[in-house]
Amino acid sequence: SYGVAVLAIGLFPDDVELLRAAILHDAPESGVGDLSGKSKRDNPDLKAAYAAVEARRCEELGISWESSQRLKLCDQLEAYLYVAHRNPRLLKTDDWPRVRRSIWDNAVWHGVERQVLALLEAAEGVDTGT
């Protein structure tokens, strides 16, 4: 996805494999659609069936990539920023507080917390003073 790729370049500019993964990681959804992370966590059997369908779709498309925590960070951050822009009230509900904590923990782990905090605060309408 474009947004995930832009975040990957911005946060990890030297990681070419991450950029490739960011570009390709949503391609299997072109045939089956997307399934929320919450749905996957709440329904392990559905998660497994969806993963099998995605794997077949990747095979059909002739694509593969390595998943990573960096990719997860960029993917979750892109989704969070999208919701913050489209319907910010949702960020206080459902699974979004947990997603934000996951984003933050992953950003700290990778040493990009300053950049991620600026994006989160901008999306949430927090004045960063910069």
Image (tube, grey):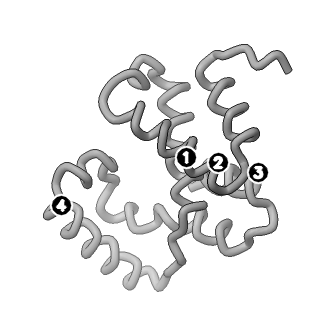
Residue 36 x, y percent position in the rendering: 32, 47
Left or right: 59, with 101 as reference point: left
Q: Which type of secondary structure does the marked residue at label 2 adopt?
A: helix
Left or right: 65, with 9 as reference point: left
Amino acid, disc 3: Gly
Quadrant of the frame with the N terminus: bottom right
**Res 44 label:** 4
For label 1, the crowd category at 10 Å Cα-Cα, with few meaning under 14, some 14 to 19 and many 20 or more, is: some
Q: Are marks 4 and 2 in contact (CB under 8 Å)?
A: no
For label 2, the crowd category at 10 Å Cα-Cα, with few meaning under 14, some 14 to 19 and many 20 or more, is: some
Between discs 4 and 2, the one toward the N terminus: 4
**Res 108 label:** 2
Residue 11 x, y percent position in the rendering: 74, 52
Closer to us: 49 or 29: 49
- Residue furthest to the right in view is 130
Q: Which type of secondary structure does the marked residue at label 3 adopt?
A: helix
Numbered disc in front, either 3 or 2 = 2
